[in-house]
Image: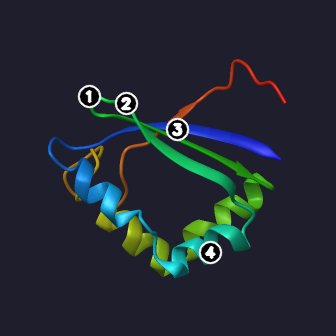
Amino acid sequence: MLRKAFYMEVQDGKLAEYTKAHNPIPDEIRDVLKKHGVKNYSIFHHPGDKVMFGYLEVESEEEFAKIASYECCHKWWKQMCNYLVTATPDAVKAKEEPMEMVFHLD
């Protein structure tokens, strides 16, 4: 099992909409994630600022990469650009910065 973490930022005033969009996520997105080995996926918000932290576990990088081949995922990512900071104004996916694990305890 591989652990992945990433950092992103929510746009000003968009946290409630972002949260609503994720509760629950669309069934087709959930099914694609599970089909390709995503487990224990959580997104956290740091109160008082725009910081968002995501954590997930995947079976393999190869399976995880296959998620990008689904049109429903591209539509979802584009929708999330309405709530999250993007690298460019015409981006089709939110700006995510990968994080490195420095400690783990089972």
Q: Using the numbered discs, state the Cα–Cα distance from disc 3 to disc 4 in whole angstroms.
A: 19 Å
Q: Residues within 10 Å of mark 2 (few under 14, many from 20)?
A: few
Q: Using the numbered discs, state the Cα–Cα distance from disc 2 to disc 4 in whole angstroms.
A: 27 Å
Residue at x 25% of width, y 27% of height: 48
Direction from residue 55 to residue 52 in the image, left or right? left
**Quadrant in the rendering for residue 50:** top left
Direction from residue 25 to residue 98 in the image, left or right? right
Q: Position of residue 42 (x, y in %)?
A: 55, 48
Does the image show residue 91?
Answer: no
Direction from residue 55 to residue 95 in the image, left or right? left
Q: Position of residue 37 (x, y in %)?
A: 75, 63
Q: Position of residue 66 (x, y in %)?
A: 66, 68
Q: Which residue is mark 2?
A: 46
Question: Looking at the image, how many numbered discs can be counted on the residues?
Answer: 4
Q: Which residue is mark 1?
A: 49
Residue at x 83% of width, y 47% of height: 1
Residue at x 72% of width, y 40% of height: 3
Q: Using the numbered discs, state the Cα–Cα distance from disc 3 to disc 2 in whole angstroms.
A: 13 Å
Helix, strand, or loop for circle 4? helix
**Mark 1: which amino acid?**
Asp
Q: 90 or 8, which lies in front? A: 8
Q: Position of residue 45 (x, y in %)?
A: 39, 37
Q: Which residue is mark 3?
A: 6
Residue 32's disc is 4
Q: Which badge, 3 or 2, comes first in the chain's sequence?
A: 3
* Callout 2–callout 4 Cβ contact below 8 Å: no
Direction from residue 91 to residue 61 in the image, left or right? right
Helix, strand, or loop for circle 3? strand
The residue mark sitting in front, 2 or 4, is 2
Residue at x 30% of width, y 43% of height: 87
